[in-house]
Image (cartoon, rainbow, N blue to C red):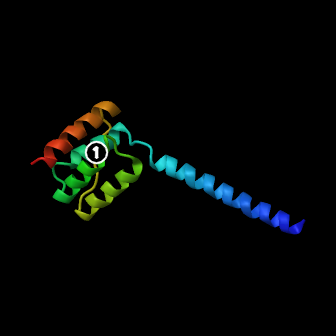
Amino acid sequence: MNEISQRLKKNGLLAVLAMLLAAVAGYELREIDGNSYRAVRAAFPTGSADYRAAVATAMAGGTINRWELQGLERQLARDGQAFIIDARAANLHEERLLLAAKARWGASR
């Protein structure tokens, strides 16, 4: 009986750990908000060529998730810049379209 109890505890712990990892991954894969799109778009013209390429790559799927945003923040920090958070973002859909257009135009130059 003791061995069965130990296995149940071990499997239960693994199940809880798996659920926790799934919750974190689900949160990180959610799309960013309009203000974050605006911050990425505002940094686009002054960002390095590597930053602009990273934005274009992130926007290739049509959206940017929180995980990709962290990578863009790190890329911008390596360039000695930071995002400027502006609360005047239009809305999620409009900001996403504006960034997509800018990323496509900037990537084609």
| Residue toward you, 73 or 8 | 8
Q: Is residue 22 above or below residue 7?
A: above
- The image shows a total of numbered marks equal to 1
Q: Nearer the viewer, residue 36 or 64?
A: 64
Q: Which quarter of the picture shows residue 60?
A: top left
Mark 1 Cα-neighbour bin, 10 Å: few <14, some 14–19, many ≥20: many
Identified at 77% across, 62% down, the residue is: 9
Whole-percent x, y for residue 14 in the image: 67, 60
Up-down relation of residue 20 to residue 105 (above or below): below
- Please indicate whether residue 22 sits to the left or right of residue 14 in the image: left
Q: Residue at position x 62%, y 56% from top?
A: 18
Q: Nearer the viewer, residue 13 or 91?
A: 13
Q: Is residue 28 visible?
A: yes
Residue at figure coordinates x 14%, y 42% from the top left? 105
Quadrant where the N terminus lies?
bottom right
Residue that sits furthest to the left in the current view: 109
The residue to which callout 1 is attached is 59
Give percent across and percent down for residue 95: 28, 35
Residue 91 in view of the camera = no
User: As displayed, is residue 13 above or below residue 87?
Assistant: below
Q: Position of residue 11 (x, y in %)?
A: 72, 60
Rendered image quadrant of residue 31: top left
Give the residue furthest to the bottom: 3
User: Front-most of 14 and 67?
Assistant: 14
In the rendered image, residue 72, in percent from the top left (x then y), is placed at 30, 55
Residue at 33% across / 41% down in the picture?
63
Amino acid identity at mark 1:
Met
Q: Secondary structure at mark 1?
A: helix
Give the side of residue 10 with respect to residue 84, left or right: right
